[in-house]
Image (spheres, rainbow, N blue to C red):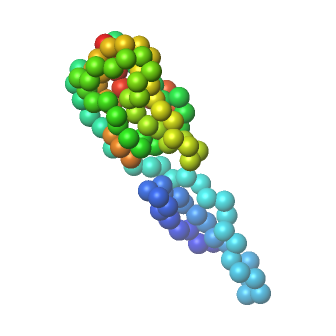
Amino acid sequence: MKNYTITVNGNVYEVSVEESGAESAPVAAAPKAAPKAAAKKAAPAGAQGSVTIAAPMIGKILKVVANAGATVKKGDVLLVLEAMKMENDIVAPQDGTVASVNVSVGQSVEPGEVLATMN
């Protein structure tokens, strides 16, 4: 049995390969995820607001449309989140001012993670 560490798109996997004999090729065991290094989080831009905008699903931030201090109306696009190869607009839930943007372009997010706040 041989163990390998493989990195794919920034994700680290530990893989064990068992040699089954000279007549057949090695068979790879199912990869198990190794502990990942903490992902870099964007520093919040500005003070936190009273209204939070959370990620609805796992995804990756493609674009930050509205920055801290921007005045927005209900339904205005704040961020673009890519999930399952689809672009999803993250919109303002109400009229107000963007207090902070807690993510940056290229960052992966989990469901419920705070993306931005508003006042």
Task: Inspect this view and state whether residue 107 appears.
Answer: no
Residue pictured at 47% horizontal, 38% vertical: 81
Residue 108 lies, in percent from the top left, at 44, 42
Q: Would you place residue 13 above or below residue 113 in this image?
A: below
Camera-side residue: 11 or 18? Answer: 11
Looking at the image, residue 28 sits to the left or right of residue 85; the answer is: right
Q: Would you place residue 64 above or below residue 85 in this image?
A: above
Looking at the image, residue 2 sits to the left or right of residue 36; the answer is: right
Residue pictured at 56% horizontal, 43% vertical: 86
Quadrant assignment, res 99 = top left
Residue pictured at 54% horizontal, 60% vertical: 14
The C terminus lies in which quarter of the figure? top left
Task: Inspect this view and state whether residue 85 appears.
Answer: yes
Residue 63 lies, in percent from the top left, at 38, 41
Residue pictured at 53% horizontal, 68% vertical: 4
Quadrant assignment, res 68 = top left
Residue 51 lies, in percent from the top left, at 38, 14
Looking at the image, residue 21 sits to the left or right of residue 68; the answer is: right
The N terminus lies in which quarter of the figure? bottom right
Looking at the image, residue 10 sits to the left or right of residue 86; the answer is: left
Quadrant assignment, res 101 = top left
